[in-house]
Image (tube, rainbow, N blue to C red):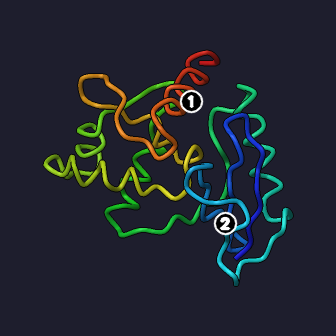
């Protein structure tokens, strides 16, 4: 596994890759800089495209990431992550919408849990999922960051 840190407008993000696909993008509060598994190797080379696309996203110039992704999770979690990637830039969906999309309409809480375990934040846009009543709900980066990301997308939509 390879990793690097990316200095984003929202703080330092940690990226991880198996050398072929991105496996992780973590928010600053999800790790401590310098604490990585001992078998991981620091290298920026597997992340050149990801960092360019993140730069473009934060500049409001990129709406759809084009990167090989390999998120971990159960089949259900991966179905939810696929559904998140179908949410258009600048739009939101409720947890119930996602549950319906994955054909498990009663699994709203399970969708919330899968959304919360998203290992590739921003690129798999879990920030676009909100409560059915339009309220902001739990987010790994914090609700302030979730609002910031939604505002960024609304500005460049």
Q: Name the front one of labels 2 and 1.
A: 1
Image position, residue 60 (x, y; %): 71, 25
Label 2, residues with CA under 10 Å away: few <14, some 14-19, many ≥20? some
Examine the rendered structure and indicate whether residue 122 appears above or below residue 110: above
Count the labels in the image: 2
Closest to the observer, 93 or 27: 27
Examine the rendered structure and indicate whether residue 111 appears above or below residue 73: above
Image position, residue 134 (x, y; %): 31, 22
Examine the rendered structure and indicate whether residue 84 appears above or below residue 80: above
- In this figure, which residue is indicated by the disc labeled 1? 149
Picture quarter with the N terminus: bottom right
Image position, residue 110 (x, y; %): 24, 55
Return the mark for residue 100.
none
Examine the rendered structure and indicate whether residue 107 appears above or below residue 58: below
Q: Quadrant of residue 48?
A: bottom right
The residue at 29%/50% (across/down) is 111
Label 1, residues with CA under 10 Å away: few <14, some 14-19, many ≥20? some
- In this figure, which residue is indicated by the disc labeled 2? 21
The residue at 73%/42% (across/down) is 54
The residue at 36%/57% (across/down) is 79
Closest to the observer, 12 or 103: 12
The residue at 71%/78% (across/down) is 40
């Amino acid at each position: 596994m390879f990793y690097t840190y990316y200095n984003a407008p929202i703080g330092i993000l940690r990226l991880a890759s198996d050398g072929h696909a991105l496996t992780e993008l973590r928010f600053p509060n999800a790790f401590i800089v310098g604490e990585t598994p001992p078998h991981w190797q620091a290298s920026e080379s597997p992340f050149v495209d990801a960092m360019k696309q993140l730069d473009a996203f934060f500049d409001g110039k990129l709406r759809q990431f084009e990167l090989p992704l390999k998120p971990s999770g159960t089949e259900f979690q991966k179905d939810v992550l696929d559904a998140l990637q179908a949410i258009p830039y600048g739009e939101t969906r409720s947890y119930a919408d996602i549950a319906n999309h994955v054909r498990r309409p009663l699994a709203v809480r399970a969708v919330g849990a899968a959304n919360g375990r998203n290992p590739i934040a921003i690129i798999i846009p879990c920030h676009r999922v909100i409560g059915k009543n339009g309220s902001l709900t739990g987010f790994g980066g914090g609700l302030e960051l979730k609002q910031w990301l939604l505002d960024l997308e609304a500005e460049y939509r």
